[in-house]
Amino acid sequence: MPPPILVPATVSDYRREAQRRLPTFLFDYLDGAAGEEVSLQRNEADFRAIQLEQRVLRDVSAIDTGVDLFGTHLDMPVVLAPIGMGGMMARRAEVLAKRAADAAGIDMCLSTVGICSVEEVSAVSGRPIWFQLYMLRDRGVVQELLDRAWASGVRTLTFTVDLPVVGARYRDVRNGMAGGTSALGRFRAGLGSYLMHPRWLWDVGIRGAPHSFGNLAAYVPGAASPNQFKAWVDKQFDPSTDWNDIAWLRSVWKGHLLLKGILNAEDAVNAVDQGADGIIVSNHGGRQLDGVASGIAVLPEIAAAVSGRCTLLVDGGVRNGQDVVKALALGAQAVMVGRPWVYAVAARGEAGLKTWLSAMKNDMRTAFALTGIRTVADIDRSMIRQGL
Ligand SMILES: Cc1cc2nc3c(=O)[nH]c(=O)nc-3n(C[C@H](O)[C@H](O)[C@H](O)COP(=O)(O)O)c2cc1C
């Protein structure tokens, strides 16, 4: 067992702490991905393989990492990605994330299947959150979710298009989250694992209730546990969703509309033709189709295909400020980060996430200084030395 970390410095430090704190099935749900996790590894490896071009003697005394995105100023081009069941990893984690995002001057996107509701998270501050939508079979519920999001001040909607079916996540299978276990197995995975993690049990398991899917609680009255909600939601994902639904969404949603989960240039062009204001180039953190390319690998061809007609974000494997600079140099206007924010909040709560976001900003400033730029507008392809 490695010694405890006094001050986490990297995402992997927070990850290690999160692993100690969380019941195994929750850590694996967060940390894992689909199949053999090839795409998950590719996401990080592809970022690591990109080299930045160092430039010197350029007066970098006044650096500004800020950007304007969908009418809002962000102190750095980073948005916290939607994470289903986030609130199982820390007490009311989505609320903590919103507070940390506010402190860092960035936005966060709440998942349809978050633990905290859009109303609860929006109440944190006057700065609106983004809302992530899954298309559910019951379009009445979808319309009501959109109305609630709008009433809560949401103006940026992220519609996730890469979940017509749920990816096969083997760690969840092994931990019995997909069923098929004996009574003893269920005890070990559930209560047994909780008892092995008393700090989590007290802080999240007991004081973090209710553990309903806050946005959906009204529509699944019989459900009492996240697993029961998950079972309902898994049946509600609508594999018949197609481009007509995008046209419908576009007609009913008056705010900014982003499609999340596009990896193909033709799909990206279709999205823009259907009126999407933005695209999140993403393989869902490797959790859907194992073996697909990373977002960062396909970003340049998508940027070329839509050539400035919409705002581009990329996610999957962004782990530090240098990665943000790499993503912008390859055509994105901002990035999303998923697991890192949850590791930080699971490890050290709101303070941990605030510290990590400050570190991201410092990393970005260092990367700006040593690539010889001062503002996001200065970033371009020439900063990439080789690689993708
Ligand atoms: C535990 C977990 C839950 C997620 N839940 C959602 C979700 O509810 N909706 C969604 O659009 N994406 C979801 N994602 C994908 C993230 O929004 C994001 O695309 C991905 O985590 C980015 O990769 P990264 O974790 O390497 O940063 C989830 C990812 C993880 C790890």
Image (cartoon, rainbow, N blue to C red):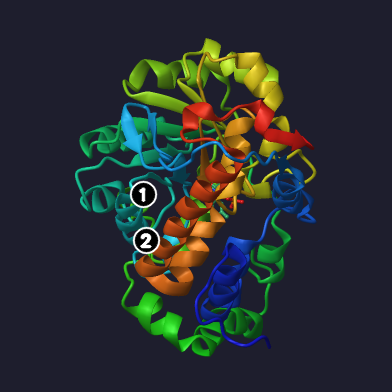
Residue annotated with mark 1: 216
As drawn, 373 above or below 35: above
The label number, if any, that marks residue 3 in the structure image:
none
Residue annotated with mark 2: 212
Q: Badge 1: few (under 14), some or many (20 or more) residues near its Cα, within 10 Å?
A: many
Q: Residue at x 46, y 70 (%)?
A: 346
Tell me the kind of residue under disc 1: Leu
Q: Is residue 375 left or right of residue 3?
A: left
As drawn, 169 above or below 352: above
Farthest residue toward the top? 273
Question: Residues under labels 1 and 2: Cα distance?
Answer: 8 Å
Q: Would you say residue 296 is visible in this rendering?
A: yes
Q: Position of residue 381 (x, y in %)?
A: 66, 27
Q: Would you say residue 228 is visible in this rendering?
A: no
Q: Residue at x 37, y 84 (%)?
A: 202
Q: Residue at x 53, y 76 (%)?
A: 22
Tell me the kind of residue under disc 2: Ser
Quadrant where the N terminus sits is: bottom right
Of residues 25 and 283, which is closer to you in this image?
283
Q: Position of residue 11 (x, y in %)?
A: 57, 63
